[in-house]
Image (tube, rainbow, N blue to C red):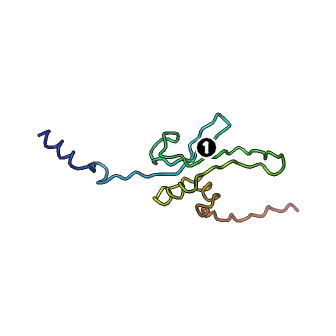
């Protein structure tokens, strides 16, 4: 009896689960993985399965993000945050349905790959005048 069930499973390449769903699909996310030391973060922009840990092995590394402002080398101008991104691979993963996290969405929208998320304008409440 065990031989018949094992051969039946070997013939069927797609495994079905009785408990959850008929065909399980892994959700892929574009998110930030934190590295660096304490109070000096450094992030990799990665593509990973949605249910894995933040710093687990990713499917692919798309780029890096250094949130600590750096001064320009010539000493003039405004400090900048360093973002390096492989836009072709990011477009590919967005095209196949990868869902970016909110911080990754912000970085991708700054790179021009996504539209910025809608942020409603907060009504300005005037301060009470002291007379």
Image coordinates of residue 28 in percent, x first then y, are: 46, 51
Left or right: where 4 falls relative to 42: left
Q: Please determine whether, in this image, residue 85 is positioned above or below residue 4.
A: below
Q: Please determine whether, in this image, residue 39 is positioned above or below residue 110.
A: above
Residue visible at 82% across and 46% down in the picture: 74
- Seen from the viewer's position, the closer of residues 121 and 44 is 44
Residue visible at 74% across and 64% down in the picture: 124
Residue visible at 63% across and 58% down in the picture: 111
At mark 1, the secondary structure is: strand
Q: Which residue has dot 1 on it? A: 43
- Seen from the viewer's position, the closer of residues 51 and 73 is 73
Residue farthest along the left direction in this orientation: 1
Image coordinates of residue 117 in percent, x first then y, are: 60, 62
Q: In which quarter of the image is the N terminus?
A: top left
Left or right: where 112 falls relative to 8: right
Residue farthest along the top direction in this orientation: 37
Image coordinates of residue 71 in percent, x first then y, are: 78, 45
């Amino acid at each position: 009896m065990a031989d018949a069930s094992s051969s039946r499973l070997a013939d069927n390449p797609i495994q079905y689960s009785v408990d959850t769903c008929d065909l399980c699909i892994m959700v892929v996310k574009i998110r930030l993985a934190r590295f660096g030391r304490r109070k000096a973060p450094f992030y990799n922009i990665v593509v990973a399965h949605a249910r894995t840990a933040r710093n687990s092995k990713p499917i692919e590394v798309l780029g890096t993000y250094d949130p600590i402002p750096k001064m320009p080398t010539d000493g003039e101008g405004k400090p900048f945050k360093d973002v390096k991104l492989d836009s072709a691979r990011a477009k590919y993963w967005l095209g196949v349905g990868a869902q970016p996290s909110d911080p990754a969405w912000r970085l991708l929208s700054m790179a021009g790959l996504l539209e910025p998320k809608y942020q409603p304008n907060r009504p300005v409440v005037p301060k009470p005048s002291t007379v």
